[in-house]
Amino acid sequence: MKAEAAGAGGGRCGGQGGGRLRSSSDGSRYSRRGVGLSANSSSSPVLYNPKSVLKRPVSTEELQTPGGPYMKKTFTIVGDAVGWGFVVRGNRPCHIQAVEPCGPAAAAGMKVCQFVVSVNGLNVLNLDYRTVSHLILTGPRTVVMEVMEENPNTNH
């Protein structure tokens, strides 16, 4: 799944909010609200994909290996009236399954396939996505997340 493909249509993120999407309370799927994201595409973008976006399973140990193929990033995401704009999936570790192209998470730099390390300072590497989603949904409107993403300079 390529979340960035849904943003085709150029410059729509700053519009009237017609292209914004809403995630359900458990963050499991997006549904349309108002105008579609890309009026010129023949098929609507797929934002909810039940299949994992990961190419292969990754262990928490692999993520934490010093000098390994992953680097840490920190995002501060301010939720809006619709939500934070991303979906968490997986179990020990969780990963970002989808990012709403015009949402707060995308604006902060979050991308699909990043692994969630901490939420508001709490290490979540050994939790499942339901617990991580619950922490985010019941926490403050501003969430600070540490993630690990594959370092583009490593080959593996």
Image: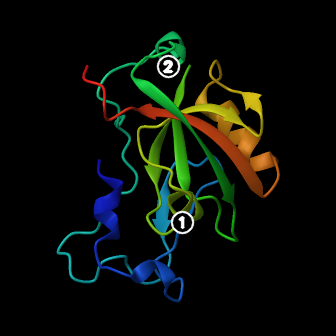
Residue at x-position 64% and y-position 34%:
130
Q: Please say if 51 is above or below 47.
A: above
64 to the left or right of 140: left
Tag shown at residue 63? 2
The C terminus - image quarter: top left
Residue at (54, 16) in percent of width and height = 64
Label 2 crowd bin: few (<14), some (14–19), many (20+), radius 10 Å = many
Please state the total of marks drawn on the protein image.
2
Residue at 51% across, 74% down: 20
User: Could you say whether the residue bearing mark 2 is in a helix, strand or loop?
Assistant: helix
Crowd band around label 1 with a 10 angstrom C-alpha radius: few (<14), some (14–19), many (20+): many
Mark 2 vs mark 1, CA separation in Å: 27 Å
Specify which label sits upstream in the sequence, 2 or 1. 2
Percent of width and height locating residue 79: 69, 62
Q: Disc 1 marks which amino acid?
A: Gly
Horizontal and vertical percent position of residue 39 = 27, 83
State whether residue 16 is above or below residue 106: below
- From the viewer's side, name the closer residue of 13 and 74: 74
- Kind of residue sitting beneath label 2: Leu
Q: Nearer the viewer, residue 142 or 46?
A: 142
Query: How was the colour assigned to the protein in this rendering?
Result: rainbow
Choose between 81 and 123: the one closer to the eye.
123
Residue 138 location (% of width, % of height): 80, 47
Considering the numbered disc 1 on the image, is that residue within a helix, a strand or a loop? loop
The numbered disc on residue 103 is 1
